[in-house]
Image (spheres, rainbow, N blue to C red):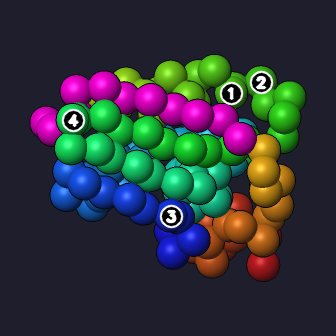
Amino acid sequence: MSNIIIRDELGIKDQIIETLHTVIDPELEPASIVDIGLVYEIITKEDGTSKVIMTLTAPACPVAGQLMEEVQQKIGKLDKVKKSLVELTFEPPWTKDMMSEEAKLMLGLF
């Protein structure tokens, strides 16, 4: 999580991060998208807009739409969020080095 860029005008970064920890990539269960390093940036604006910039483990990820929709829906349910956006990026490309130590342990990569 320490590599996530956060710009939080709503003061809800902890709620957003906690919520994103509930989004699990089915291909890397039980690790969350935060633990595996898919979340690059979180932005909230005073007008209630929230934007999560994230990536995928591979450009052809079969669950891309499902993950993005789940992020958008879950963040959109937070009290101060009026509009939830998710942006997909592949810069920088995701690597296993972006995973937390905890995720690597969960997935047996040590």
State the separation of the CA atoms marked 1 and 4.
28 Å
Secondary structure of residue under mark 2: loop
Left or right of 62? Residue 81 is left
Q: Look at the numbered discs 1 and 3 and tell me whether their residues touch, using CB distance below 8 Å.
A: no
Q: Tag 1: residue type? A: Ala
Q: Tag 4: residue type? A: Asp
Left or right of 34? Residue 103 is right
**Label 2: which residue?**
62
**Label 3: which residue?**
5
Residue 12 appears in the rendering: no
Ranked by sequence position, the earlier of labels 1 and 3 is 3
State the separation of the CA atoms marked 4 and 2.
33 Å
- Whole-percent x, y for residue 88 in the image: 66, 35
- Whole-percent x, y for residue 41 in the image: 52, 54
Residue 77 or residue 83, whichever sits in front: 83
Q: Which residues are magenta?
A: 79-89
Answer whether residue 87 is magenta in the image.
yes
Q: Nearer the viewer, mark 1 or mark 4?
A: 4
Ranked by sequence position, the earlier of labels 3 and 2 is 3
Residue 37 sits in which quadrant? Answer: bottom right
Q: Nearer the viewer, mark 4 or mark 2?
A: 4
Q: Look at the numbered discs 1 and 2 and tell me whether their residues touch, using CB distance below 8 Å.
A: yes
Question: Which residue corresponds to the image point at 64% horizontal and 58% vertical from the top-left?
Answer: 36
**Label 4: which residue?**
47
